[in-house]
Image (cartoon, rainbow, N blue to C red):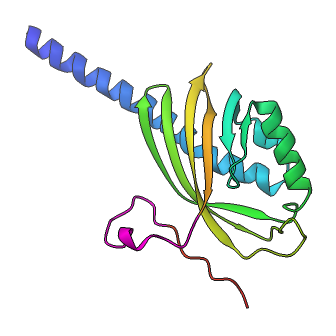
Amino acid sequence: MKRLFLILAALSYSTIGDAQTKSDEDAVRALPRAFCEAWAKHDGHQLATIMAEDVDFVTVGGAWFHGRADFEKYHTRLLSGRFRDSTNTPLETIVRFLRPDEAVVHWSWTIERDKNPDGSPRPKRFGIMTMLAKKQNDIWLVAVAQNTNAGPGAPEADDIKLPIRLPKATPKP
């Protein structure tokens, strides 16, 4: 009887854990979509709402911003300037929980209709962002993120199955 009780207790605990994990995974998976929805509105303030107060964010250009205020200031300028007509679309998202309140999110994206600093149009491009999300007061926020433009691709990786393989952008003639 004691053994049956322990088995039932273990099964009910794992079911509760799975339910919470599913809910948390859904919330974490929503972060890239929320990022791109704010981007579509070209709203730096809305974009900053998914960031932790002390976020560390590295841009595709290598600029490292610390804190939500600087993240918001930069993205407000960017999205009202040469990225005001751009679209950012999430392609694929992979989530890995490190702890019940911490998860790593890798997501690929494509961006179109942005401009170079000189105002000339840029070709469609792809990239990948890595986020460390933390659950704070029952809300998942981005604590750390690194955004990376896709490069030409290393031939050394050709026969390796990558979790997310980025498509090659073909510039329009």
Query: Residue 93's x, y, as percent?
Result: 51, 53
- Going by the picture, which residue comes out furthest to the top? 2
One can see residue 45 in this view:
no
Image x and y of residue 53, in percent = 73, 26
Q: Is residue 160 magenta?
A: yes
Residue 43 in the image: above or below residue 125: above
Q: Which image quadrant is residue 18 in?
A: top left
Q: Nearer the viewer, residue 78 or 49?
A: 78
Residue at (76, 35) in percent of width and height: 49
Q: Quadrant of residue 171?
A: bottom right
Q: Residue at x 63, y 51 (%)?
A: 147
Provide residue 110's location: percent of width, then percent of height: 65, 66
Name the dominant secondary structure of the magenta segment. Answer: loop
Q: In this image, 40 relative to 96: left or right?
A: right
Q: What segment is highlighted magenta in the picture?
A: 150-165
Which residue appears at 61% of the width and 46% of the height? 146
Figure check: 130 above or below 165: above
Report if residue 9 is visible in the image: yes
7 relative position to 137: left or right = left
* Residue nearest the viewer, comparing 51 with 81: 81
Q: Quadrant of residue 68?
A: top right
* Residue occupying image coordinates x 56% and y 34%: 133
Q: Is residue 116 magenta?
A: no
